[in-house]
Amino acid sequence: MATLEKIRQRKKILAIVIGAALIAFIIEVGIEAIGRSGGNSAAAKVGNEKIDIMAFQRRVEQEAADDQQQNNKQAEDGAVRQQRVLDEMINEKLLDQEYDKLGIFVSDNEISQLMIGKNPAPAVVQFAQQVGAKSPAELYDFIMNPGKQGIQEAQVLELRNQWNKLKDDITKQYKFAKLQNLMAGCMQANDLDRAQMAEDEAVTNVVTYAKKDYASIPDDKYPVSDEEIKAEWQKLKPMFKTDEDVRLIHYIAVNIDPSAEDIAAANRIADAAYIALQKGRGVDSVRLLGTVQIDTAKMLQKDLPSKVRDFFASAEVGTTRRDSTVNNHHVMYKLINKQMSLDSIDMGYVVVQGDAKMQKSVMDQLNAGKSLDDLKKAYPQKVDGKLSQWQRVYNSVDSMKAKFANATPGVFFLFDSNEQGGTLLKINDKKAPKMFYTLATITYDAYASTKTSEDLRDKFQAFLNKNKTAKDFEENAAKAGYNPIEMMVGTSTAQLGLGMYGQQPIKDSRKAIKWAFDNKKGDVSPIFSDNNNVMVAVAIDDAYEDGYFPYNFTQGKEMLTQRIRNSKKGDDLMKQYEGKAKDLNGYASLMGVKVDTANVVFASGNPSIEPKLVGRMSVAKQGVFQGPIKGNDAIYVYQVVKQEKAERKPTKEELDNRYAQTRGAQLFASPRSIYNILSKATTVKKNLIKFY
């Protein structure tokens, strides 16, 4: 924040080099129907500005549409995507507010140069190449002046929208690069910084030391009272600040797994499918079972499934093979065909926009030795192509492969044609034919029957009926065969289990989290089964809403208790050892520990010694015994036995790079650091929990 204030006081904006990544998140699913809550229509509030819930909804829906167009099958949980969209919009709002404060903007001339200038942005060049334009300037003229090409406005509308979207993205990128550059300019090492860094690593102290770890002493001898914990919490209160309301919960997740009867039924279906696969000519007989999935693919031997690769390499067409069943997942194969086929060709292609006469004329000129570049000049925007490109063709239809096989090498021929235009091809080279295998893979998974699902639900509901308080929910779960899991959830937590070590996130569990914020401490939820594979119930252990975690919440209480107990152990050990020995070996003997040796450098520390002691050891005088000293985790005694000076002094460039990495631009001007600085300097309130 102080750095940003320095930037605001500067009068001159530095020259910028584009280098920041575009700020974009891919959101994969749509938002649920959203209702209003208490007249508040803000999905979030950033400082004094709101992010309207309907604008948020439109953004999510657009992201979902884009994702669908990309045919992304790995769609993530809807609530995770919603939270990602909101975070993106919050970051954009934070940046826009900072741009206004700093006077950062992108002029019309700057964006024009980035889009269609002599050196346009790489993303613009790539976009132009993808749509077949020679340059961004040519593409811009085409989509903004379609009449010049005899094209109607509606035909370029989608392309124009993509251009404008790219322009917006480039503008955001350029603004962000300016902000990064300004921050980096305010965080440069001066002579004093360089001198300090050089001094911090100029000397290595070789230290012999002994330490008595507090963990080696039984805890029960050092009780900690509730009042002591509360007092320690008060001293460390800033550490317990929370940016959102929080609930401490326990949740139970019941997997809807197939029963023994379901598995037996699945085995019978899989057996029937394999018999049908063996007897049938193809895989149509297996399709009659309905629930079996069939995938057919043509591939080289090296691409066959590893377990059956060698088997099918020498097998006859029609051969079947059944894989071992793992986790009730059945897999079987049938070899549909084996065929030598043309694999890859190096071809040249030329696209001609014109009638049959023009197509033949271009082909004849190419075969007569006319260059493609000359033909492009002779027929501007009518002829384009590429003279060499390797292409895999093994999946092409037989008629197309026949054209490739029968073509005269090095001679253009008419590949396809209509009244508006045609494509000319030339085969430059061919790779030798290879053996291809057409393999059908049939899979079937056992699933829980309706009866199994209902039985699991009835049992779970019976448990909830008997345990209607959070205390009973937690204490009696194990007796009933359930595993209650403790979790801290905030208003922006998207899934149960998310971020927890050893726990898989539970998809479609956001409703259970919302329930925890709509009810009170001690309540137990109904069953949530939005995820077809898991049933969930939640119990509210505690609610934290005043901006700080209380002194007695589980994780905090454990940390505070250990901190207080360690301090007591340290005080006790200091009384036991102080003045009772004269040297390192004497204290090591009293402590019952061995003497160790460590190299201590102030700049880099030492992993076996806590930072508090590293600082003291790095400036201690050689040969002077020190201790005992109370640390946070142990009692130490030590002595510097040798001092080794660095063989050479670091260069100015090395010190500047080290400064950038440890306390300068690389540390604080990264996108994540900038977002963190801005969010800490601005009050951000997320409200999605009110809407879904």
Image (cartoon, rainbow, N blue to C red):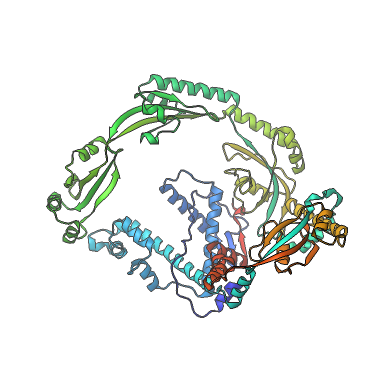
| Residue at 15% in and 52% down | 366
Horizontal and vertical percent for residue 191?
58, 77
Q: Nearer the viewer, residue 504 or 156?
A: 504
Q: Which of 581 and 467 is in front in this view?
A: 581
Horizontal and vertical percent for residue 234?
78, 62
Q: In this view, does 277 lie above or below 358?
A: above
Quadrant location, the N terminus: bottom right
Say if residue 593 shows up in the picture: yes
Report the residue that reaches farthest toward the bottom. 11
Please state if 350 lies on the left or on the right of 550 as rendered.
left
Q: Is residue 14 above or below residue 625?
A: below
Q: In this view, does 628 lie above or below 387?
A: below
Say if residue 551 shows up in the picture: no
Horizontal and vertical percent for residue 95?
53, 67
The quadrant in which residue 309 appears is top left
Total number of numbered discs in the rendering: 0
Horizontal and vertical percent for residue 280?
37, 21
| Residue at 50% in and 53% down | 60
